[in-house]
Image (cartoon, rainbow, N blue to C red):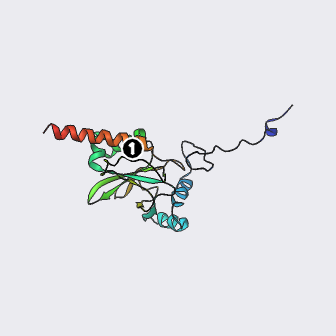
Amino acid sequence: MPQETDRPPVPPLLSPLFGAAAVRTDSDPSEAVAAWLAGAHPKPKRVLRHWEAGADELLPLGGRFAAVRIPGAILHAAVGSDDDQALTVVARDTLRGPVIAGTYARRRTYWALVPWRAHVYWPSYLTDTPYLGSGSYLTVPPPTCIKEPIPYWVTPPRYRYDLCSREHVFNVIIRGCSAMSREAGSR
């Protein structure tokens, strides 16, 4: 009678998004998440040293992940609040992935990390919320930095390959733009 140990090993799940073995869990050790993020940089060990010292790091986009820049006014309108707790709930439950808070052009801005594709359709009418990929860089705080000062993680990645769905990000942006249009129309 075969025993449990006689079974052939189960191959890892292959991620169709990244072409690498990726097992999705509710969370990975923080070191694994940090190493995965740092892997976007040509010198990941340097990034990890900077993060251990509490410093932010400039990471290239377009390899491991991309980002969608969302002005604070749009995200706040979508949420109906500028309260950090409400934003955290939306980022966790609606965007379902990592979001960084910071500033752009001296205004509160958010960056949702999304899967990168060389040829991705992002509507041209969303000029205020560009899809940032190859050739763009993003200041990324240490993965443990979840409170101000900015930049900080509204929701940090929970596991390797944890990214927001572009469709979820698009839906939140449309909801925010619609809320802003309704508010402007009622004035």
* Quadrant into which the N terminus falls: top right
Q: Please indicate whether residue 71 sits to the left or right of residue 18 in the image.
A: left
Q: Is residue 3 above or below residue 75?
A: above
155 in relation to 134, above or below: above
At which x and y percent is residue 81?
A: 27, 42
Answer whether residue 74 is visible to the viewer in this image: yes
The three-letter code of the residue at mark 1 reads Val
Q: Determine the residue located farthest toward the top in the rendered image.
A: 1
Residue 53 percent coordinates (x, y): 46, 66
**Identity of the residue drawn at 50% across and 47% down:** 162
Picture coordinates of residue 149, whole percent (x, y): 34, 59
> Which residue occupies the extreme left position in the image?
187
Say which residue appears at 39% left-offset and 48% top-offset: 122
Q: Position of residue 50 (x, y in %)?
A: 47, 67
Q: Which residue is mark 1?
A: 169
Is residue 6 or residue 53 the one in the foreground? Answer: 6
Q: Quadrant for the C terminus, please.
A: top left
For label 1, the SS is helix
Q: Is residue 77 left or right of residue 32?
A: left
Q: How many marks?
A: 1
Q: For the point 45% across and 54% down, which residue is it?
A: 66
Q: Is residue 98 left or right of residue 11?
A: left
The answer to whether residue 81 is seen in the rendering is: no
Dot 1 crowding, Cα within 10 Å, few <14, some 14–19, many 20+: many
Taking the image as shown, residue 86 lies to the left or right of residue 47, namely: left
Q: Residue at x 60, y 50 (%)?
A: 19
